[in-house]
Amino acid sequence: MRLSADLKVNDDDLEEFEEIIGFRFNDRTYLIQALLHGSLFSGDKEKLSEFRKVNGLENKDYEKLEYLGDSVLGLIIAEYAYHDKDINEYAASKGLTIEGVCTKIKEVLASNKNLKPVARKIKLSRFVLAEPHVNIDGKLSDMMESLIGAIYLDGGSGGSNSDRNYSIARDFVYRSFDIDHALDRISISNPKGIIQEMFHQKGIGNPLYRVIDEEGPAHDRYFTVGLYLDERLLASGSGNSKRKAEKAAAMSYLEESDLDSQKQ
């Protein structure tokens, strides 16, 4: 993001980012605040103070907006989950609680790991206001939440209508997060966690993962792992690490469970 000689944020850059995210701010100070990383002018308090004054900013960086955006995103996901009848069917078919499934949906949409791809999709790092030498990759998920907070506050209407503001923030989340396919991603994201909860709900014990076979030289091992309930082998999977093999075994078991449920 470019700054002019008087430290004002470049309007063309802001407009370009608005085009990418599909939302035009009524008050761009919210957007600038959401993009402000703490490293900018961190060694020059006087310059930072002038920057905030010129651009009309209330806070030192994006963090307060991040806190708000996290809450707004959580509400949007919870509301979506409440109205999605497929969640009830999925939970029943897997022997899971509704709360457990909804928690996993929030994880695949709003965890730090899963917020980063959304940030990259909208080219967020290009527009962050930070010192050039600072690696902001680890903060992209936080700044995604600050952007949601900024959109919520602005709402395209000067922040005067909370219902409209929420609706506009929700539209942005639906556009950017592929929320309609969240349920499809649960088993892919954490199959071992799903099996753990499934067994817990059914009261049948804990799943165990054991290495069945190892192949290859020490620097390039290939593992086959079995998923067991007590001493009974339920499924197996392979990979170039034990963790990947365990995940493959869990996925195999879930896929077999789906096939069995379809045959009944």
Image (spheres, rainbow, N blue to C red):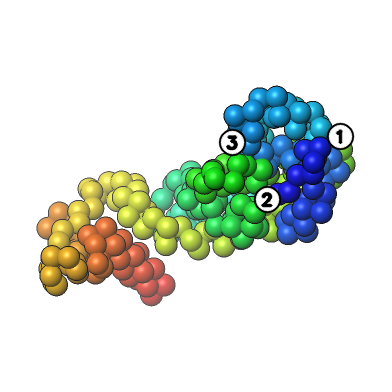
**Which amino acid is tagged 2?**
Phe
Pointer 3 local density, CA inside 10 Å: few below 14, some 14–19, many at least 20? some
Pointer 2 local density, CA inside 10 Å: few below 14, some 14–19, many at least 20? some
Q: Position of residue 87 (x, y in %)?
A: 53, 55
Checking the image for residue 39, the label placed there is 3
Spatial distance from mark 3 to mark 1, Cα to Cα? 32 Å
Q: Position of residue 63 (x, y in %)?
A: 62, 33
Return the residue at label 2. Answer: 127
Q: Position of residue 235 (x, y in %)?
A: 23, 67
Q: Nearer the viewer, mark 1 or mark 2?
A: 2
Residue situated in front as seen by the camera: 113 or 54: 54
**Marks 3 and 2: in contact by CB < 8 Å?**
no
Checking the image for residue 160, the label placed there is 1
Element type where label 2 sits in the image: helix
Spatial distance from mark 1 to mark 2, Cα to Cα? 27 Å
**Which amino acid is tagged 3?**
Ser
Residue 250 visible in the current orientation: no
Looking at the image, residue 252 sits to the left or right of residue 12; the answer is left
Element type where label 3 sits in the image: loop
Q: Residue at x 83, y 49 (%)?
A: 11
Earlier sequence position, callout 1 versus callout 2: 2
Q: Quadrant of residue 40?
A: top right
Earlier sequence position, callout 3 versus callout 1: 3
